Amino acid sequence: MALPISGRVPARFVLPSTANVRPRQPVAFVSLSSATNDGTIDWVEATSDFFEKDTRPIMLFDGVCNLCNGGVRFVRANDRNRRIRLEALQSEAGKKLLRRSGRAPDDISSVVLVEKDRSYIKSEAVLRIMEHLELPFPQLALFLKFVPLFVRNIAYDNIADNRYTLFGRSESCEI
């Protein structure tokens, strides 16, 4: 499902110690200028520097999942023009971009593709990533879009929910 980036994330996604307190200084990586009067943070503004000089989309992946690390190697091998940037979900940048996408910063349940104006999750993220790769992957993505989203996401969820059991975990991130 494509998630339009509204830029506003409910205060429940703010760290618990800062949810109800207006800090005098920036907390972690959030500037005070990105806070709004209603207690939400404008994560699009707070993360705009990710897309100022480089507008390529960013693929967020589980950095300790062997399946995901294999996916990163696959993307690197089939993205010779480097159209996609890569970032682990567990990194500070990954957590910021998750918030930008309207997801909890500790949600590592899905690959996420973050573009300047929207985000994609689950099977839609995978298909969108395929569109950026070398031939024949864009054509394969086009063909797979004819499979209903709920069917694609059921298959995606079954693999994602069992990825550590099936493929294992690593102690370090691929990038």
Image (spheres, helix red, strand yellow):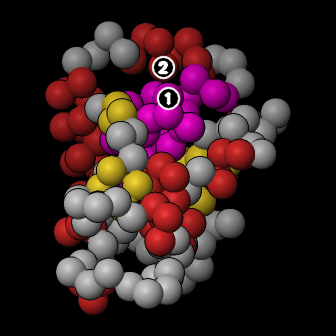
Quarter of the image holding residue 123? top left
Foreground residue, 34 or 98?
34
Q: From this view, report whether residue 109 is shown above or below residue 124.
A: below
Identify the residue under disc 2: 141
Q: Does the magenta segment cover residue 132?
A: yes
Residue 3 lies, in percent from the top left, at 33, 36
Q: Quadrant of the C terminus?
A: bottom right
Tell me which segment is drawn in magenta.
110-133
Residue 130 lies, in percent from the top left, at 56, 29
Disc 2 marks a residue whose amino acid type is Ala
Q: Please tell me which residue is depicted at 50% across the width and 81% down the height of the picture.
A: 26
Horizontally, is 165 left or right of 48 in the view?
Answer: left
Which badge, 2 or 1, comes first in the chain's sequence? Answer: 1
For mark 1, give the secondary structure: helix
Q: From this view, report whether residue 25 is shown above or below residue 100.
A: below
Foreground residue, 10 or 107?
10
Q: Does the magenta segment cover residue 11?
A: no
Foreground residue, 140 or 52?
52
Residue 15 lies, in percent from the top left, at 31, 80
Q: Is residue 41 visible?
A: yes
Residue 85 lies, in percent from the top left, at 67, 48
Q: Quadrant of the N terminus?
A: top left
Identify the residue under disc 1: 128
Q: From this view, report whether residue 141 is shown above or below residue 123.
A: above
Total label count?
A: 2
Q: Closer to the observer: label 2 or label 1?
A: 1
In this view, the residue farthest toward the right is 81
Foreground residue, 2 or 86?
2
Does the CB distance between marks 2 and 1 fall below 8 Å? yes
Horizontally, is 80 left or right of 127 in the view?
Answer: right
Q: From this view, report whether residue 29 is shown above or below residue 89.
A: below
Q: Please tell me which residue is depicted at 23% across the width and 60% down the height of the picture.
A: 38
